[in-house]
Image: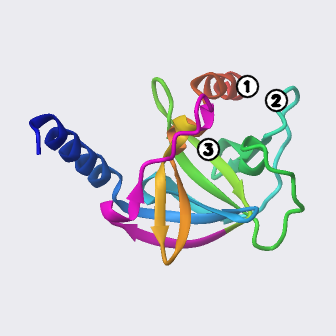
Amino acid sequence: MPPTMLATAESAATQNDVRAGKYLTFHLANEEFGIRVLKVREIMGLQDITAVPQTPCHIKGVINLRGKVVPVIDLRLKFGLPAAEYTQRTCIIVTQVQGESSVVLMGIVVDGVSEVLNLTGQEIEDTPDFGEDIAGRYLLGMAKVKGKVKILLDIDKVLSTQEIHGLNAILS
């Protein structure tokens, strides 16, 4: 194998190793997604969400989490999926998101939590090239588990820096 191809293969293997680890999987519509367990602070049932005026429709509002005000987004709406009635399985996953200067707690509403998976590098493939689509920037890869594909999210990039600044300004 020529040295450049070898280096490319080695860097691809390294990238897979970086993405390997434990993921919390959850449902949105008919798809399964996963986020790193290290980013999850807690999973809670649905509770009263205080709406905040003049925010995008995917930002449902804020909750009081043990004295801290935490913004909550509906991932279905963020990803352009149709809105759905909340059920007994609907829950809020409180995640830790890296903003520009600090870590921000953020709640994401999902249809239901599935399981925690320990994924190896061999089970994770690069995201297919969708062209100029901006969605690709917050996809870590695709996990192949038991014949199904799970979409792995980089939760730090699901909300843009601009949206996080907007949320911080609202909550200040």
Q: Residues within 10 Å of mark 2 (few under 14, many from 20)?
A: some
Q: Position of residue 91 (x, y in %)?
A: 71, 63
Q: Tag on residue 19?
A: none
Q: Is residue 159 visible?
A: no
User: In the image shown, does 123 or 164 lie closer to the viewer?
Assistant: 123
Q: Position of residue 2 (x, y in %)?
A: 11, 39
Residue at image position (65%, 51%) is 65
CA gap between label 3 and label 1 equals 14 Å
Q: Is residue 129 left or right of residue 22?
A: right
Q: Tag on residue 55?
A: 2
| Residue topped by disc 1 | 170
At label 2, the amino acid type is: Thr
Q: Quadrant of residue 169?
A: top right
At label 3, the amino acid type is: Met
Q: Is residue 53 visible?
A: yes
Query: Element at badge 2?
Result: loop
Residue at image position (60%, 73%) is 114
Query: Element at badge 3?
Result: strand
CA gap between label 1 and label 2 equals 9 Å
Residue at image position (62%, 57%) is 93
Q: Earlier in the sequence, mark 2 or mark 3?
A: 2
Q: Residues within 10 Å of mark 1 (few under 14, many from 20)?
A: few
Dots 1 and 2: beta carbons under 8 Å? yes
At label 1, the amino acid type is: Ile
Q: Residues within 10 Å of mark 3 (few under 14, many from 20)?
A: many
Q: Earlier in the sequence, mark 3 or mark 1?
A: 3
| Residue topped by disc 3 | 106
> Where 164 sits versus 40, above or below?
above
Query: Where are the magenta residues, as a range?
Result: 113-135
Quarter of the figure that contains the C terminus: top right
Q: Is residue 128 magenta?
A: yes
